[in-house]
């Protein structure tokens, strides 16, 4: 009998109380009679209460649940104790026709206030309503400040940047930032702007070399040619010549030597090494 009781308790059918009651009463010879009578009375009372609950009417604008018993309100209605009341849609809002949530949302250009009304979104001067329709952003050329948009003041010879953080404007080409203004870059004669934002803002023309704040013409000695490499004086000796101050002198090759890859120095042949300006045989 105990197995029968356990099976009935684990099977949540509509009539399990009635079957359990019959089982207990049938087994009164096994279970103490007083206990059996008490359990039978409890089950009978619960069965009556459950039958009454299941028989409770479904209110208007509701429908029974697909699983588990009970009922839910229809769309655009919300439960209030044992009734389904219509969702009250405030002005400047629309019904969502959903069974969850408030049942309404504010129209574009309005925002929810205290969960009951929809107030118009205030858009300050220099701002615009964003795509959500519930907030605003500042226009280009304006900066958000407190509850408004402040116009960005540009100095002469400057332009706006699209930076979200940091510098809001930069100077035009040929000018550099000097505090809150843009000052002209002093470009010496025979030079041009190089577009660099740091360091020297100009570069000397070809054939000229920077000397302080000016560009001086490169004096190319005999047996040399112009070379604008930064580590050279503006010229380079021809092959077979070596730089000596401001001139190029011809290289005198010792015996068993040859010009190196640069063409402006010499090195010893294989099996020879340099020694006192000569090439000595390796021992």
Image (spheres, rainbow, N blue to C red):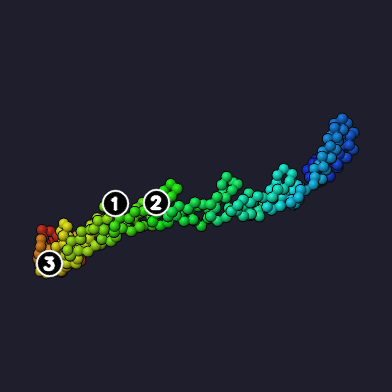
- Which badge, 2 or 1, is on the more N-terminal residue? 2
Q: Which mark is residue 150?
A: 2
Residue at 60 percent across and 52 percent down: it is 91
Q: Mark 2 near mark 1, Cβ–Cβ under 8 Å?
A: no
- Give the secondary structure at mark 1: loop
Q: Residue at x 36, y 57 (%)?
A: 161
Q: Mark 2: give few (<14), some (14-19) or many (20+) Cα within 10 Å.
A: some
Q: What whole-number distance in Å separates the C-alpha atoms at marks 3 and 2?
A: 59 Å
Relative height, residue 6 to residue 238 (above, below) = above
Q: Is residue 90 visible?
A: yes
Which quadrant does the N terminus fall into?
A: top right
**Of 230 and 139, the residue lying toward us:** 139
Q: How many marks?
A: 3
At which x and y percent is residue 279? 13, 62
Residue bearing the label numbered 3 = 220
User: Are the residues flagged by discs 3 and 2 in contact, CB closer than 8 Å?
Assistant: no
């Amino acid at each position: 009998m105990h197995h029968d009781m356990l099976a009935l308790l684990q099977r949540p059918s509509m009539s399990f109380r009635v079957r359990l009651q019959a089982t207990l009463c049938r087994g009164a010879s096994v279970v103490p009679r007083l206990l059996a009578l008490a359990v039978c009375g409890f089950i009978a009372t619960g069965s009556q209460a459950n039958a009454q609950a299941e028989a409770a009417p479904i209110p208007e604008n509701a429908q029974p649940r697909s699983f588990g018993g009970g009922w839910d309100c229809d769309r655009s209605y919300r439960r209030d104790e044992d009734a389904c009341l219509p969702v009250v849609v405030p002005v400047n809002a629309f019904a969502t026709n959903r069974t969850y949530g408030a049942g309404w949302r504010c129209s574009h250009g309005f925002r929810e206030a205290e969960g009951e009304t929809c107030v118009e979104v205030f858009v300050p001067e220099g701002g615009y309503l964003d795509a959500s329709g519930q907030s605003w952003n500042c226009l280009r050329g304006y900066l958000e400040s407190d509850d408004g948009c402040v116009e960005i003041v540009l100095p002469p010879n400057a332009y706006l940047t699209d930076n979200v953080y940091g510098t809001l404007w930069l100077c035009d080409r040929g000018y550099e930032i000097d505090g809150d203004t843009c000052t002209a870059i002093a470009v010496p004669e025979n030079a041009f702007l190089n577009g660099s934002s740091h360091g020297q803002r100009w570069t000397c023309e070809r054939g000229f070399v920077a000397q302080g704040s000016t560009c001086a013409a490169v004096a190319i000695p005999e047996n040399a040619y112009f070379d604008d490499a930064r580590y050279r004086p503006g010229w380079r000796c021809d092959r077979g010549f070596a730089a000596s101050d401001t001139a190029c002198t011809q290289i005198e090759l010792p015996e068993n030597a040859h010009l190196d890859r640069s063409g402006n120095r010499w090195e010893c042949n294989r099996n020879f090494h340099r020694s006192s300006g000569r090439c000595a045989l390796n021992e």
